[in-house]
Image (spheres, rainbow, N blue to C red):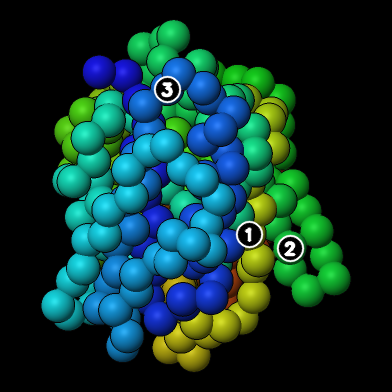
Amino acid sequence: MQGISYIISTHNRPGLVNTAICSVIEESRNVPGINTELIIVDDNSDCAFTPNKNDLPEYKGTISIVRTTKTMGVSKARNLGLENAAHPYILFLDDDDTSFPDRSKALYPLIQNSGYSFITGKSVMRSGKNTLIIPEGDSAALTPHVYLNSFPHINSVIWRKNDLLKAGGMDEALPYFGEHLAALKLLLNGYTAFHTPETVSAFEYQDGGLTLESHQNNRFHDNSVALFTTLLNYSLHHPAFRNTCMNVLKMMAVNKLQNFNDLIKLLSANQKSDCAEVLPL
């Protein structure tokens, strides 16, 4: 059976998550004839979240709630949604973000009519008074190198469920990079993916919540190091990509990363560098 499972994980954000739910319902209307469902994973909120259907637009699909009895974290919560998904294609949305009305319309045909494991689009990133479209670039087949230099936001990626499960879902040991490690594992193992220049979602990037916690505890930097160290183990048969990971680790040794913007700048500098020196293991 063809169809889309939308997954929203939430924790203590009842007001924001309603906006996210409404945006998903709106986009589902633009893929008529496609079966859809909405799975909300309530990650042990202080007050159990239940959507008030009277406050929501009419939705022809099903809405289900998965509740955890202890706080699992965003990657584990997403994986719970993935495990409960009934349809073969998956679209995630963070509870404080919004999808655009044409997100499903733009991404679903590309993956449904192809053998790609995932399709990435672009997102509007709002940070204070600044607005950026990420990632940059035109239509392109994704390789590990291309993906590494154009990290998409999870809201702008549609996944083939069975392939994502083969990658182990979202890596739960890397809370800021679970989806990126899953994508790179697929690409390094011969699966294919594609990037479309369609802008399909929006998110706020701010120093609050998880971002603030990572900044205070230097966890973002530590998890960035862990990501590229882990990638070394998956790239034994990809020497050029392995060397890239080594170079990035060397740069991280002298550049403390505070946030995702710092990582993007470092990756861009590495991409432009002609230096062939690598970090010895």
Q: Residue furthest front?
A: 54
**In the foreground, 204 or 276:** 204
Split into 4 quadrants, where in the image is the N terminus?
top left
Please determine whether, in this image, residue 66 is positioned above or below residue 86.
Answer: below
Residue shown at 83% from the left, 65% from the top: 130
Q: Residue furthest top?
A: 113
Q: Which mark is residue 34?
A: 3
Local SS, label 3: loop
Check whether the beta carbons of the residues at disc 1 and disc 2 lie within 8 A of each other: yes
Please determine whether, in this image, residue 196 is positioned above or below residue 126.
Answer: above
Q: Picture coordinates of residue 216 (x, y %)?
A: 49, 90
Q: Residue furthest right?
A: 129
Local SS, label 2: strand
Instruction: Assess disc 2: are there few (<14), some (14-19) or many (≥20) residues with their C-alpha within 10 Å of its C-alpha.
Output: some
Instruction: Assess disc 3: are there few (<14), some (14-19) or many (≥20) residues with their C-alpha within 10 Å of its C-alpha.
Output: some
The residue that disc 1 covers is: 203
Split into 4 quadrants, where in the image is the C terminus?
bottom left
**In the foreground, 169 or 219:** 169
Tell me the CA gap for discs 1 and 2.
6 Å
Q: Is residue 7 left or right of residue 213?
A: left
Query: What amino acid type should be assigned to the residue bearing mark 2?
Result: Arg
Label 3 or label 2, whichever lies nearer to me, is: 3
Say whether disc 3 or disc 2 marks the residue closer to the N-terminus: 3
**In the foreground, 79 or 64:** 64
Q: Quadrant of residue 26?
A: top right
Query: What amino acid type should be assigned to the residue bearing mark 1?
Result: Phe
